[in-house]
Amino acid sequence: MWRCVNKKMISVLLSIAIFLPMFGSLFLSLTSKRRSFLIDAILPIVSSTLLTVVAVYFYDRSLTFFETKILSASIFEIGYLIDYFSLSISFIVLLISSIVALYSLSYFKGDEKQYKFWFWFNLFVSSMLFLVLSNNLLSTFIGWEAIGICSWALISYYYDSSKTSTDKVFSTLGDQSVYSSLKALFYTSVSDVFLLAFIIVLYFLTYKSGTPTLDYTLLQQVLNFKQISPNIVIILSLFLILGIIGKAAQLPFSSWLPDAMVAPTPVSALLHSATIVKAPLVLIGRLLIFDPFLVSNSTFQSLAIVVILPTVAVASVNAIAEKDIKRLLAYSTISQIGLILIGFSLSQSLSATWYSTFQFISHAVLKATLFLVAGIIIHVYNTNNLEEIKINIRENVVLFLSTTMAVFSLVGFPPFSGFLSKELLLHSIKNYSAIIYAVVLILSFFTPIYSFKFLTMFTTEKGAKKEDSREIRNMSLLTFILSLFTLVLNFLFLFLAAQINLSLEFTVLFSFNSLVILVLFAAISLLSIVSFKAIPNSISYVLLTINKLTACEGVSIYSYYKHFSRMCKKFNKVEKYSTSFYILLVLVGFLIYLSVMLVIAIK
């Protein structure tokens, strides 16, 4: 069947799959003024189909990985690296993007400027696919910067809205959108400078060795890491950890993500599940598979522990105290991304890397589901405040089931994917250090508290507000379909594990230790939901007190930004016009960097 198929054809298929959403949406935006955006919504689905052909070819040939190059001019290279890791992540990106795209058809119905959303949405998808499938660090960095710019554009979607802002600092939703988008761009860009420095240092190390390259499959062959100076290792580790914590929303760059919730809910679903905050996980996972020394050295691991564990603690407490439904999910994401990063950083084997990858995939599906649920609720109730939302379970069975499956998976109850992925992740951390395992386990006990707070919206009381429009039914159905993957992912992971010969230690799942942890999680979950239902005022007071004690605003850079913004609101118009100029400077600077690197490589 595949005899007539060669690497060149696979390269063409991959290129079409990656760039079809971007160029398709651009072509539609430039050539037609339309009322229907169905074609824009199905572009990710078409890409999924093309990627399936590539995956079948890869599986049929029983390949470990294969690399194909499209363009190569010294160090500047565009190529694809196909293995089970990149295929798994790509399919999750396209699955969630496809569901969110179809969901957005109903969500944005009647919105006259949604053509802007569709262009940036599809560019977002293409950029993430390019990042995931790239075969070298330079191409990865191009995709890395592109998703940052797309995030800025999508977060500022309501930049011209005159609607009153829910944040007292801002007078209108438009002002809040502009600030939040600029903040996201600034925070992540500062962090990106360190990632660029990491790439430059690596390049000069390979240049010094006589074979300049940034190819993932060649770095370990070209560089003898055992002979690299310990000072260089420290520099590389420092640049790498500082380079990833911006987009991963870890301290001190964490506060941009909750503020980015001013964006439309489909944007939030994509941000948290399959794009920008997951990009650092993709990079670390890719380095672990082909160049493990860059991540598994003791310096990087120590830095990761010092930076990430406090972030998980602060974010978890803020999630418990938060009343805004989307900001609660944002703090949850910060916490869970931190735990996954710890898992990746402390990986000591290929199996441990895949355990973290499975947790990454599981979290992407459940978090997208919860955000889509939040979008429906906000659409119906026109409020983000959890205490003001009461949903009748009998009249909203599909929505309740979707939420319950996602929450149970987030907490880690069987038979949902979160149970298997969480247990395997904790086991891999335990193999590294019993002390770190104990700390992570204690921090994990916060998860059921803020997760079940999400379920307090549902009630058996009659008369709860309900909107039964066609759009709501469509969005609810799509959300339910996505939530079913919290069950399906277990089987897909077991199939994948068999293909790559992973040593799965299932005895961990049925050990006494695992049973005790599961019982504790169940007890905490039950206690939390009873507490939130029975004595909400007392609980809120205690949580707000704890929230102040954590001094999150003091730790975060945002405290200064927030106070400064009160004095600078009159400069909003200048800020709006200067944003495009700033983006142009970023692009020009990056092109200058590419030119310099190319000249050095040629010489």
Image (cartoon, helix red, strand yellow):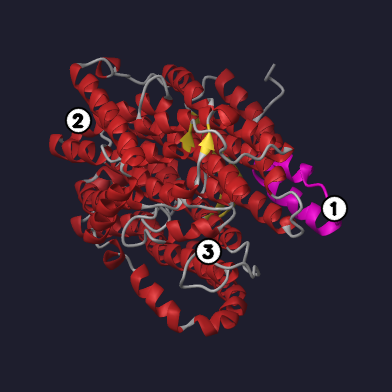
* Residue 43 location (% of width, % of height): 72, 41
Q: Which label belongs to residue 431?
A: 2
**Residue 17 highlighted magenta (yes or no):** yes
Q: What element carries label 3?
A: helix
The answer to whether residue 100 is above or below residue 603 is: above
Disc 2 residue type (three-letter): Asn
* Residue 497 location (% of width, % of height): 41, 20
Disc 3 residue type (three-letter): Leu
Q: How many labels does the image show?
A: 3
Q: Is mark 1 on a helix, strand or loop?
A: loop
Q: Is mark 2 on a helix, strand or loop?
A: helix
First in sequence, mark 2 or 3: give its number: 2
Which residue, given by chain and number where applicable, does mark 1 sit on?
Answer: 34
Q: Nearer the viewer, mark 3 or mark 1?
A: 1
Q: How crowded is mark 1: few (under 14 residues within 10 Å), some or many (20 or more)?
A: few
Residues at marks 2 and 1, CA–CA distance in whole angstroms: 57 Å
Please state the extent of the stretch shown in magenta in the rendering.
14-43
Residues at marks 3 and 1, CA–CA distance in whole angstroms: 42 Å
Q: Which of marks 2 and 1 is in front?
A: 1
- Report the magenta stretch's main SS: helix
Residue 525 shows up from this direction: yes
Q: Residues within 10 Å of mark 3 (few under 14, many from 20)?
A: some
Q: Which label belongs to residue 73?
A: none
Residue 428 falls in which quadrant of the image?
top left
Q: Which label belongs to residue 598?
A: 3
Q: Who's the residue at 53% across and 64% down the image?
A: 598
- Seen from this angle, which residue lies furthest front? 462
- Quarter holding the N terminus? top right
Q: Who's the residue at 23% across and 34% down the image?
A: 429
